[in-house]
């Protein structure tokens, strides 16, 4: 219980820091850092959604970026048709989905599409275990990657450029500060919901299934169904991160779905500490900051980043979160 | 008195019945036509030397290693083709060998996670009732499963199975490797369960304890039930012949 409370405190502290940093940057005249901070928030959301299935469900997915890409393309395709003045869908019986630059519509479509494809791919991949599960999730992600590369209408390999960040009634999303705080609000909302989810009976079943799946089945619980629901929810959350990413960079490309992106998100989770929700946000922060800082000094920054990651994995039990908990004192 | 077992011996309404159950692991057959039964509210022991098929019988009942021949029924419903979780939902609680509690959940969470009333019991087991049976668990409620001693883990495994409110409890080596005092506490808990009318099928090596509370014993040898009888029939001669003690 104490560990839980300390984790809550750490989460609150981290979110408070994220809330206070932008005005500080403004005072220091370093507004350009806001863009980096915003990327950290969005990647943090994507990594925290992966943490639901990896950290709590024990499902090592190497295809999570597919849902990030589906979310981003949901926003991109809606905006593309809006510029073109055409409909995204024009089916019989009046079923028409017009192009739109509405952020809310993009979020809704992304949640539905990413959740649906999460359900679809999860229903197949969750029938496998271990290495097979890793490979099948990777294969699904690569399928989506090559599918979007083949869509010439939506830019193929070049992707889609957006003209602005879309619309949200009452807010000017092209203002970096407003967009940043919107992303922070969505991240907080996700973390609150995810915290409730993981501490609920449903979350306990997931964690129990991670520890011993066969035992849980022998106690009357169809673990597959629980995992599938979790997988689809995590996919939907990654879809939201995809929309935010598309609007932040005003650009969507198939590269978002490449398996290396999935690997990058997984590194954020492991670096920050899996099964903690706030850890992946810390992991995203440290990884993106290191990338940014090291790239100033050398173009071979990966040579430094690689050994650093190895050291963290070897010596920091449960990543940065584990280190901070250790500094904060023992549970007992 | 030594006799070959041929058919289930009626001791009231039969709850669990195994008839001609044959099970194999890959190409290696382990059970060769196992027949046994557990009546409503009865406590039954499954005895035998190591490797005679006791645990496999329990795994077959639970669907963890489904039989390829024979029938297993619980209150008349056939189990052998059902998935594991459905069998559990029909009201069978398993306390497996090696306890297998969830190590990253607290003792309380281990109980909460499986809380259900599969048998539709009018006075279902709750965490409080489990703590009444095993007070030691109440003291360790917030400790992680991995931090509990072997005895506490065993109590937790029994409590966890009870939280599903089963009609029938299967215990596989419930007191194996435990200190005598802890073992006594487990037997005391099992006696309480028996007094409350729960049907129990138990595998254990403590014959003296079993004889005190178990009504019927089945002895297995090389994948078959070769003897069955009441505690009074389980004489030293029977034990020497089939169990080597």
Image (cartoon, coloured by chain):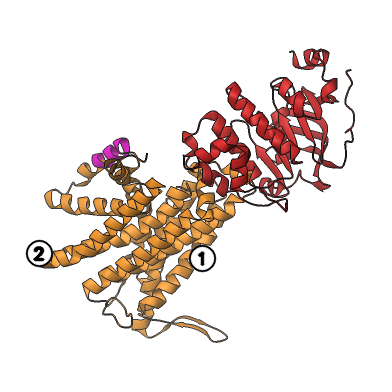
Chain colours: A orange, B red
Q: Circle 1 sits on which residue? A: A116
Q: What residue is shown at x 54% (from left), y 61% (from top)? A: A120
Query: Quick one: quadrant of the N terminus of chain B?
Result: top right
Which stretch did the figure color magenta? A307-316
Q: Circle 2 sits on which residue? A: A28
The image quadrant of residue A110 is: bottom left
Chain identity of mark 2: A
Q: What residue is shown at x 46% (from left), y 49% (from top)? A: A56
Observer able to see residue A12: yes
Residue contact between numbered discs 2 and 1, judged by CB atoms under 8 Å: no
Observer able to see residue A149: no
Q: Secondary structure at mark 1?
A: helix
Q: Is B209 above or below relative to A188? A: above
Chain identity of mark 1: A
Query: Badge 1, how many Cα within 10 Å: few under 14, some, many 20+?
Result: some
Q: Secondary structure at mark 2?
A: helix
The image quadrant of residue B226 is: top right
Q: In front here: B151 or A137?
A: B151
Q: What residue is shown at x 62% (from left), y 48% (from top)? A: B126
């Amino acid at each position: 219980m104490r560990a839980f409370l300390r984790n809550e405190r750490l989460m609150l502290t981290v979110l408070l820091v994220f809330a206070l940093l932008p005005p500080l940057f403004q005072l220091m005249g370093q507004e350009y850092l806001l863009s980096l901070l915003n990327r950290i928030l969005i990647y943090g959301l994507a990594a925290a959604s992966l943490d639901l299935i990896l950290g709590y469900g024990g499902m090592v997915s190497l295809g999570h970026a597919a849902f990030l890409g589906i979310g981003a393309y949901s926003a991109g395709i809606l905006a593309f048709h809006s510029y073109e003045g055409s409909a995204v869908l024009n089916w019989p019986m009046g079923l028409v989905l017009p192009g739109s630059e509405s952020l809310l519509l993009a979020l809704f479509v992304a949640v539905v599409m990413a959740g649906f494809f999460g359900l679809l791919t999860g229903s197949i991949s969750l029938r496998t275990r271990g290495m097979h599960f890793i490979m099948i999730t990777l294969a699904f992600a690569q399928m989506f990657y090559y599918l979007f590369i083949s869509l010439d209408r939506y830019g193929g390999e070049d992707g889609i450029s957006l003209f602005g960040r879309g619309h949200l009634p009452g807010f000017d999303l092209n203002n970096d500060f407003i967009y940043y705080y919107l992303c922070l609000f969505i991240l907080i909302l996700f973390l609150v919901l995810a915290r409730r989810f993981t501490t609920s009976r449903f979350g306990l079943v997931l964690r129990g299934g991670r520890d011993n799946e066969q035992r849980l089945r022998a106690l009357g619980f169809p673990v597959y169904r629980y995992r599938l629901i979790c997988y689809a929810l995590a996919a939907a959350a990654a879809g939201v991160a995809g929309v935010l990413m598309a609007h932040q960079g005003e650009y969507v490309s198939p590269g978002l779905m490449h398996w290396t992106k999935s690997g990058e998100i997984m590194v954020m989770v492991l670096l920050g500490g899996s099964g903690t929700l706030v850890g992946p946000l810390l992991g995203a922060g440290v990884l993106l900051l290191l990338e940014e800082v090291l790239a100033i000094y050398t173009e071979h920054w990966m040579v430094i980043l690689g050994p650093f990651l190895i050291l963290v994995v070897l010596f920091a039990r449960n990543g940065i979160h584990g280190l901070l908990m250790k500094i904060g004192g023992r549970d007992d | 008195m030594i006799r070959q077992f041929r058919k289930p011996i009626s001791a009231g309404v039969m709850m669990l019945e195994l008839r001609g159950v044959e099970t194999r692991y890959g190409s290696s057959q382990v059970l060769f036509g196992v027949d046994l039964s557990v009546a409503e509210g009865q406590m039954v022991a499954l005895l035998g030397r190591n490797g005679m098929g006791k645990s496999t019988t329990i795994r077959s009942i639970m669907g963890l290693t489904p039989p390829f021949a024979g029938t297993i029924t619980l209150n008349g419903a056939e189990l052998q083709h059902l998935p594991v979780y459905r069998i559990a939902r029909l009201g069978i609680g398993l306390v497996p060998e090696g306890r297998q509690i969830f190590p990253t959940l607290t003792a309380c969470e281990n109980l909460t996670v499986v809380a259900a009333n599969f048998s539709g019991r009018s006075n279902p087991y709750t965490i409080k009732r489990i703590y009444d049976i095993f007070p030691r668990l109440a003291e360790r409620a917030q400790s992680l499963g991995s931090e509990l001693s072997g005895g506490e883990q065993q109590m937790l495994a029994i409590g966890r199975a009870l939280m599903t409110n089963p009609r029938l409890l299967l215990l596989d080596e419930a007191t194996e490797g435990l200190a005598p005092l802890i073992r006594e506490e487990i037997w005391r808990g099992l006696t309480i369960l028996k007094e409350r009318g729960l049907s129990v099928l138990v595998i254990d090596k403590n014959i003296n304890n079993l004889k005190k509370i178990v009504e019927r014993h089945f002895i297995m040898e090389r994948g078959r039930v070769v003897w069955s009888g009441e505690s009074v029939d389980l004489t030293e001669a029977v034990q020497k012949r089939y169990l080597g003690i």
